[in-house]
Amino acid sequence: MATISEVSKKYNISQDTLRYYEKIGLIPPVPRTKSGIRDYDETSCGWVELMKCMRSAGVQIEALIEYVKLFQEGEHTALARKEILVEQRNILTDKIKKMQESLDRLNYKINRYDTVIIPKLNTIKSRN
Amino acid sequence: MATISEVSKKYNISQDTLRYYEKIGLIPPVPRTKSGIRDYDETSCGWVELMKCMRSAGVQIEALIEYVKLFQEGEHTALARKEILVEQRNILTDKIKKMQESLDRLNYKINRYDTVIIPKLNTIKSRN
DNA sequence: TTAACAGTTGGAGTGTACTTTAAGTCAAGA
DNA sequence: TCTTGACTTAAAGTACACTCCAACTGTTAA
């Protein structure tokens, strides 16, 4: 049982973002005290943590909202939920592949700066 | 020597985006015919291809613009250019790590759907 | 009991990266 | 010559994902 400021600190997500995530249904409704203040339990914290991980990897909010929606509809949506996960996994796999290509290319370029471009520059400098 | 529509098809980037990239300096100015129409040469195509790769991996436009700007200033900016590449490589490496974590988690969840959640659901169904 | 403070809401504002629009130019074929 | 279609520009518009704001409420400490 934690306040929004505690959860905000724990996961390093702003209070605004936590409220926003709940408002759009990225996490299920958080329990409240009788005066209406959010009182995050284990389950809510688990959702926050999951969504932090997924969002930091760039998984689309829309897909995650759909997942949460189905989750709240009950057990019988398990197959549809799995489908969402599989689709997002495929998207993520593609993205990682693209990023790896880009990373390889950056490494190649950096290596070229170290071995060719910068040494050549120093040669010119030392001649003057 | 190619028109914007050829380059657009070749790299699957919209003509609008190609013009936009040139306008903001993400690629150096493209040569023009005497009537002012873009006439992409090898060099320009190379820049387009590089930026397509970098952007599809999520490398920040600002950093790429700075790189292009330095490139156009000449050889003496080589060290600064390398610094940009190194910084972007570090950012990219972190991102890939986060995405890999997220991917592992998706795989774990999918596996749980396959081995526990969905089989259990089928058991319930077959009982009725 | 009043001030301070952490929380609440709906809605407006922001940054990034395009994307569309409006208005126009140019070259080639009917 | 007229029209078609590909091209040009600056500027406004859009989508996504927050982020901030104004106005308000409830709890605690002096």
Image: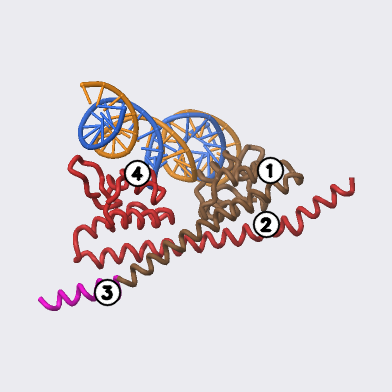
Chain colours: A brown, B red, C blue, D orange
Q: Which residue is mark 1?
A: A70
Q: Residues within 10 Å of mark 1 (few under 14, many from 20)?
A: some
Of the residues shown, which amino acid type is indicated by label 2? Ile
CB contact under 8 Å: marks 2 and 4: no
Q: Which residue is mark 2?
A: B110
Q: Which residue is mark 3?
A: A116
In terms of sequence position, does the residue under pointer 3 or pointer 1 come before the other? Answer: 1
Against A118, residue C7 (above or below) is: above
Which percent across, then down, holds residue B15?
35, 42
Side of B74 where C7 appears, left or right: right
- Magenta-colored segment: predominant secondary structure: helix
The dot on residue B5 is 4
Of the residues shown, which amino acid type is indicated by label 3? Val
Q: Marks 3/1: CA distance?
A: 56 Å
**Quadrant of the rendered structure where residue A28 is?**
top right
Against A74, residue C2 (above or below) is: above
Of the residues shown, which amino acid type is indicated by label 1? Leu
Q: Which residue is situated farthest in the left direction here?
A: A128
Q: Nearer the viewer, mark 3 or mark 2?
A: 3
Q: Residues within 10 Å of mark 4 (few under 14, many from 20)?
A: some
Residue B81 on the magenta span = no
The dot on residue B105 is none
Q: Judging from the image, what secondary structure is the residue with disc 4 in?
A: helix
Pointer 3 indicates a residue of which chain? A
In terms of sequence position, does the residue under pointer 2 or pointer 4 come before the other? Answer: 4
Of the residues shown, which amino acid type is indicated by label 4? Ser
Q: Which residues are magenta?
A: A113-128
Pointer 1 indicates a residue of which chain? A
Pointer 2 indicates a residue of which chain? B
Q: Marks 2/4: CA distance?
A: 42 Å
Which percent across, then down, holds residue C2?
48, 34
Q: Marks 3/2: CA distance?
A: 47 Å
